[in-house]
Image (cartoon, helix red, strand yellow):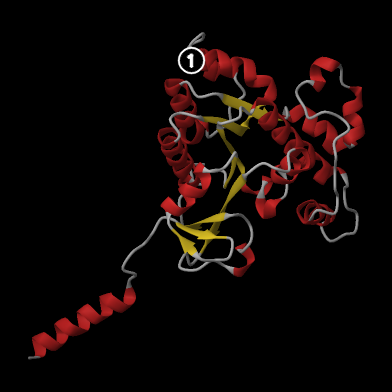
Amino acid sequence: MRGTVFLILIVAFFASGFDRHKPAYVIYDQNGREVTYRRMMRAISDADVLLFGEIHGNPISHWLQYEVVNDMHNALDGSIMIAAEMFESDNQLILDEYLGNLISQNRFEAEAKLWGNYQTDYKPLVEFARENNIPFIASNIPRRYANMVFHGGFEALEQLDEQALAYIAPLPVEYDPELPGYRAMLEMSSGGMGHASETLPQAQAIKDATMAHFLLMNREPGRLVIHLHGTYHSDNFEGIYWYLRQQEPGLNIVTIATVTQENTGRLDEEAEGRADFILVVPDTMTRTY
């Protein structure tokens, strides 16, 4: 009898002390309702553009990006293209040469401006595109030009020649400093000291505008464009999303944001409304760098 009671206590302890499941991610809609991967994919399959916001170095973000690309490629009979913040527009030529098998992998990786986590996080997508003949767009502004804006505002770009201007969004760039994301960045730059730098959100905006520009410039009707970027570039339907809407308001755009939470069993209130779908990852998740 005593042994039976002890066994019951042990079972009760383990039942109450441990979660039955430990999901690596949970998907919610913008209203905080949990949804399935299949439900999200149905919405994506009807879209013109998917803006997939990642947390850089988060392995679940990168794994799910690969799965979405793979599944959409199969579901849409190959009618997709990829675009990414992680490749600057002046790298388009070398990226095309590699995808077209004109240069070796060694030469591409030695000469392209690749992020430090390329091997683990972005190489699988580039290789998938190469193997399946999927266009891959280098959409981001060269960082030297974003740095010019950071130090001198949009006006600094007026010094560039035509060849350089081909790598950025057409000037003058439409800019709304009152968008909440840019406003928050402005306030953050002051550090509470009241000396805010107007050029910090402008440098962010020129990135957003340029990514939207190259996405639209290369978009082909009937192909889903899957754009990969840091989640802050499309959170709250701002950033890239806002610039796309200014130029082509009729586009069907689906957004995904990535957040980390201590408890994935519900969506934190502050994350509600951040995107059409919010990918919630445990904040204990390991990082790729």
Q: Judge left or right: residue 3 versus residue 51.
A: left
Q: Farthest residue toward the bottom?
A: 1
x then y, percent, for residue 243: 75, 41
Q: Please say whether residue 186 is visible from this viewpoint.
A: yes
Q: Judge left or right: residue 26 versus residue 195.
A: left
In the foreground, 214 or 77: 77
Q: Farthest residue toward the left?
A: 1
x then y, percent, for residue 117: 53, 35
In the foreground, 231 or 108: 231
Quadrant of residue 187 within the rendered picture:
bottom right
Residue in the picture at 89% in, 37% down: 153
Question: Where 156 sits versus 17, above or below?
Answer: above
Question: Where 257 sits versus 35, above or below?
Answer: above
Quadrant of residue 7 within the rendered picture:
bottom left
Q: Please say whether residue 283 is visible from this viewpoint.
A: no
Count of all numbered marks drawn on residues in the image? 1
Q: Residues within 10 Å of mark 1 (few under 14, many from 20)?
A: few
x then y, percent, for residue 81: 54, 29
Q: Amino acid at mark 1?
A: Asn
In the foreground, 34 or 157: 34
Question: Where 4 sits versus 254, above or below?
Answer: below
Q: Judge left or right: residue 280 versus residue 255.
A: left
Quadrant holding the N terminus: bottom left
In the foreground, 51 or 180: 51
Q: Judge left or right: residue 129 versus residue 226.
A: left
Question: Where 210 sits versus 281, above or below?
Answer: above
Give the residue number, with chain letter if any, for mark 1: 106
Residue in the picture at 31% in, 68% down: 20
Q: Secondary structure at mark 1?
A: helix
